[in-house]
Image (spheres, rainbow, N blue to C red):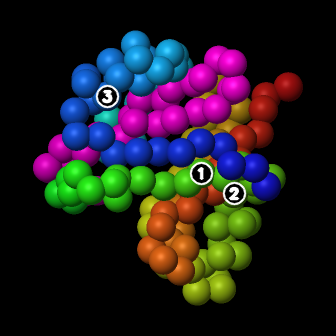
């Protein structure tokens, strides 16, 4: 299993993008949203190949919670696994609370599966797999 990326919640996407791209040199590689009121920007450190996702939730988004400005803005950890659906179902069967239901979708390069459970401390743990078209 490998840690794929870290996501942080941001209060202001524009200011955060400026900081991480202009000040830290990360490159924007994707912008998307899974639901209304959500903005996700994926960044890459080209030298280390590490990824960082900036997550913004407007007040009308179902994932919104007030921003605390006290360092607890870590959103979730994402792990690449061989079969996200299988691992997600295994963890839920063992009692892990579901944080985000499993999503399966076609991508330009293949099929992606992703779901999230909560660890014993309530931290969201993402499980993601990708099968490539060949």
Q: Earlier in the sequence, mark 1 or mark 3?
A: 3
**Residue 40 horizontal side relative to residue 48, left or right:** left
Number of the label disc, if any, that sits on residue 78: 1
- Residue at the image position 51 percent from the left and 26 percent from the top: 43
Find out whether residue 61 is within the magenta segment: yes
For marks 1 and 3, give the CA distance.
Answer: 20 Å
- Circle 2 is placed at which residue position? 84
Graded by Cα atoms within 10 Å as few (under 14), some (14 to 19) or many (20 or more), the crowding at tag 1 reads: many
Residue 91's x, y, as percent?
A: 65, 76
Q: How crowded is the residue under tag 3: few (<14 C-alpha within 10 Å), some, or many (20+)? A: some
Residue 47: percent from the left, percent from the top? 69, 19
Which residue, given by chain and number where applicable, does mark 3 sit on? 16
Residue sitting at x 64%, y 67%: 88
Q: Considering the numbered disc 1 on the image, is that residue within a helix, a strand or a loop?
A: strand
Magenta segment, which residues? 40-64
The mark lying in front, picked from 3 and 2, is 3
SS class, disc 2: helix
Count of marks overlaid on the render: 3
Q: Is residue 60 above or below residue 110?
A: below
Q: Examine the structure image and report whether residue 49 is included in the region drawn in magenta.
A: yes
Q: Nearer the viewer, mark 1 or mark 3?
A: 3
On screen, residue 36 versus residue 51, left or right, reads left
């Amino acid at each position: 299993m490998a840690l794929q990326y870290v996501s942080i919640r941001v209060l202001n996407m524009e200011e955060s993008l400026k900081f991480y791209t202009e000040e830290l040199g990360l490159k924007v590689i994707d912008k998307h949203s899974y639901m209304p009121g959500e903005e996700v920007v994926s960044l890459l450190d080209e030298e280390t190949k590490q990824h960082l996702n900036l997550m913004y939730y407007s007040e009308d988004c179902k994932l919104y919670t007030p921003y605390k400005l006290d360092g607890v803005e870590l959103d979730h950890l994402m792990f690449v696994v061989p079969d996200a659906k299988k691992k997600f179902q295994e963890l839920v069967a063992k009692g892990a609370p579901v944080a985000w239901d499993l999503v399966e979708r076609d991508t330009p390069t293949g099929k992606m599966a992703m779901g999230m459970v909560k660890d014993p401390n309530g931290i969201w743990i993402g499980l993601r797999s990708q099968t490539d078209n060949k």
